[in-house]
Image (tube, rainbow, N blue to C red):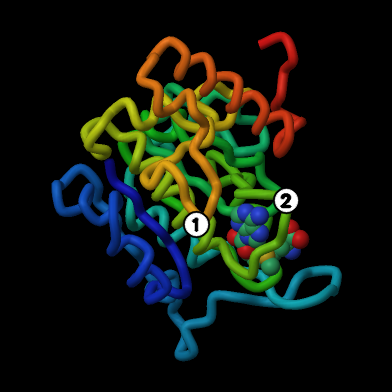
Amino acid sequence: MKFHIVTIFPEFFQGPFEHGVVHKAREAGKLDILIHDLRNWTSDRHRTVDDRPFGGGEGMLLKPQPLFEAVEAIWPERVLGEVNAVPGESAADAPVSIEPKKKRVILLSAQGRKYDQSLARELSHCDELLLICGRYEGVDERVALHLADDEISIGDYVLSGGELGAAVIVDSVARLLEGVLGNEDSTVHESFSQPDLLDCPQYTRPAEFRGWKVPEVLIGGNHAEIRKWRQFAAREKTKRFRPDLFRPES
Ligand code: SAM
């Protein structure tokens, strides 16, 4: 799978993709991440990417022209509207399912639909994703309306840029790709693999640490009992920390 990230801070990504699972996936050729400096698509001496908002207000916005030209240079077919299954469709009227589209332009935005594990799974079926990182007070709305297929928020808080969001999407999608994690079961038995349940608490050696003991059942070797305890403990943890997910009947 290939990711493109369009940003005014390409150096931001020197660290996040150099470790662990993502790094290994890149080394193994399962993941390609290309970072594009938005300023490459400016034409003035100052390489300007931003301008003041119409109607007044705080701060500056990323201008549409460098962003449209960046996407059109990375995916030239985009100019002809051939990337989208429905040419001319925008994030505003796109269906919630992204199934038919194998290449998608995603605008990172606090105003987008909220990112979660099921959306990560959907995105993991794409061939290529192009992530646009906003900055300043945001991005000219025509990018959301006429360039992006999707506007995605990584949570209900405001970041100073889309770069952290892009890194979150790359990491969470990469580990879902076939052959990226050593043990494929890792993504089956974890938080949100059942949408209404967190992972169960886990323990490792020693069986007693500073007087705190590992639950007896985990040491006993009775696998049916262990399964039952894990299900119970996962439900208890979900109820405590994520009552919004918890379903008493499940
Ligand atoms: N004025 C915008 C608003 O209130 O919605 C916030 C702009 S924010 C300071 C600058 C950029 O950070 C955004 O264009 C977006 O790319 C990114 N950003 C901020 N919060 C985000 C979030 N929760 N998820 C994804 N990207 C976010």
Number of residues whose C-alpha sits closer than 10 Å to that of mark 1, classed few (under 14), some (14–19) or many (20 or more): many
- The answer to whether the residue bearing label 2 lies less than 8 angstroms from the nearest atom of ligand 1 is yes
Q: Which residue is mark 1?
A: 132
Q: Secondary structure at mark 1?
A: strand
Quarter of image, res 129: top left
In the rendered structure, which disc, 2 or 1, sits on the residue that comes first in sequence?
1
Quarter, ligand 1: bottom right
Q: Quadrant of the C terminus?
A: top right
**In the image: residue 61, left or right of residue 193:** right
Res 139 seen here = no
Nearest the eye: 226 or 207: 207
Location of residue 168 with respect to 57 vertically, above or below? above
- Residue furthest bottom in the image: 45
**In the image: residue 19, left or right of residue 161:** left
* Mark carried by residue 156: 2
Quarter of image, res 51: bottom right
Callout in the foreground (2, 1) = 2
Name the spot of residue 62 as percent of width and height, x first.
60, 69
Question: Residue at the location (38% across, 34% down)?
Answer: 124
Give amino acid for label 2: Asp
Res 4 seen here = yes
Nearest the eye: 31 or 192: 192
Name the spot of residue 4 as percent of width and height, x first.
36, 54
**In the image: residue 88, left or right of residue 42:** right
Count of numbered badges drawn on the protein: 2
Q: Quadrant of the N terminus?
A: top left
Location of residue 219 with respect to 22 vertically, above or below? above
